[in-house]
Image (tube, coloured by chain):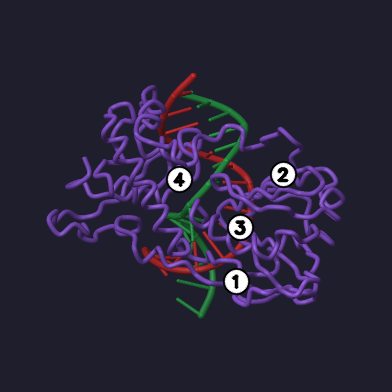
Chain colours: A purple, B red, C green
DNA sequence: ATCACAACCTGAAAGC
DNA sequence: TGCTTTCAGGTTGTGA
């Protein structure tokens, strides 16, 4: 489910309630999800304070007072739900049988003076729920990048521009669609936003990566940024079950121009084409073959 | 080395 | 109605 905008939406929901709080208790309901949990996961987490929650590509990165870093990846169906202590099952339609991790966080003793922001003076739980179990968590010591080691540039960073993308694509003869899904080329895109960005740049997903000009790469890098920024503003995309931690649904899915729009007419009034769907590297690609070349 | 594809899972939706 | 098939936002390991 989650690509960069959805992960960022989750981060923005979790950061205000988790930062500065201590892991009072951690419960694992199974030994593994996509991968086994790290050795002594519970013991290494309990007692630590979550200092800062940031994001790198599709990873949530929690800096801990212990010096370690907790990495969390939502896979396809991972989701976080906030609940009051002793009241784990709450808002939304999530099935509690897929609650794999329960963090009990310390409450905040200080009365908040910011009215718009929820205060939680007593302990509360953060539940990680993941039906398909493609998500995973890692604990990293200083200097260890774990599974983030091979990630390419952050698409919203200033350094991600046409020339950088062009250089990364120069040696690749795979279709541009596949290259943009490769997290080593650019990190954070998934199937939805690759389709949308390619449409915005008028570039066919079938084009071979090494045939893109620097100008096309510049245009593409701009489309990637604007697509992601718009989606973040919309709170991400809710296809089946994605929701922010407070249960709020994203609404960027209403703005899809091509993704899941097979047989609809191209949104460009001057084009008149029809959106097609094809399979590339096992994933559906949606595009308009009239205006994407 | 690169690339396409299967595998890892469950559940929703479509097809029969 | 119910059973079967297909598909899904990601990543990783394989085999060509």
Give SS at disc 3. Answer: loop
Q: Report the residue marked by disc 2.
A: A138
Lateral position of residue C15 relative to residue A102, left or right? left
Q: Earlier in the sequence, mark 1 or mark 2?
A: 2
Give the number of the mark in front: 4 or 2.
4
* Label 1 – label 2 distance at C-alpha: 24 Å
**A115 or A193: nearer the eye?**
A115
Which residue is rendered at x = 35% and y = 36% of the image? Answer: A176
Which residue is rendered at x = 64% and y = 62% of the image? Answer: A14
Q: Report the residue marked by disc 3.
A: A78
* Label 4 – label 1 distance at C-alpha: 25 Å
Dot 4 and dot 3 within a common chain: yes
Lateral position of residue C8 relative to residue A144, left or right? left
Give SS at disc 1. Answer: loop
| Number of disc labels | 4
Q: Report the residue marked by disc 4.
A: A156
Q: Chain of mark 3?
A: A
Q: Which mark is drawn over residue A224?
A: none
């Amino acid at each position: 489910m989650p690509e960069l905008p959805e992960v960022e939406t989750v981060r923005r929901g979790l950061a205000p309630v988790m930062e500065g709080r201590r892991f009072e208790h951690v419960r694992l309901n199974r030994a593994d999800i996509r991968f086994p949990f790290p050795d002594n996961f519970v013991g290494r987490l309990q007692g630590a304070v979550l200092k800062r929650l940031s994001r790198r590509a599709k990873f949530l990165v929690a800096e801990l007072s212990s010096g370690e870093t907790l990495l969390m990846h939502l896979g396809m169906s991972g989701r976080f739900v906030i609940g009051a202590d002793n009241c784990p099952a709450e808002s939304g339609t999530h099935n509690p049988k897929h609650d794999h991790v329960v963090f009990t966080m310390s409450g905040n003793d200080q009365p908040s003076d910011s009215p718009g922001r929820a205060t939680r003076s007593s302990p509360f739980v953060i539940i990680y729920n993941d039906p398909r179990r493609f998500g995973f968590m890692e604990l990293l010591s200083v200097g260890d990048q774990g599974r983030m080691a091979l990630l390419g540039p952050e698409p919203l960073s200033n350094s991600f521009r046409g020339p950088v993308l062009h250089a990364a694509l120069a040696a690749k003869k795979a279709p541009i669609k596949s290259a943009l899904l490769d997290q080593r080329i650019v990190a954070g895109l998934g199937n939805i936003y690759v389709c949308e960005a390619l449409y915005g740049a008028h570039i066919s997903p079938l084009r071979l990566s090494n045939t893109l000009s620097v100008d096309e790469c510049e245009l593409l890098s701009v489309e990637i940024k604007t697509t992601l920024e718009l989606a973040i503003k919309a709170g991400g995309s809710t296809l089946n079950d994605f929701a922010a931690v407070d249960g709020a649904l994203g609404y960027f899915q209403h703005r899809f121009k091509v993704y899941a729009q097979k047989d609809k007419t191209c949104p460009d009034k001057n084009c008149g084409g029809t959106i097609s769907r094809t399979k590339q590297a096992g994933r559906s690609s949606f595009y308009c073959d009239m205006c994407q070349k």
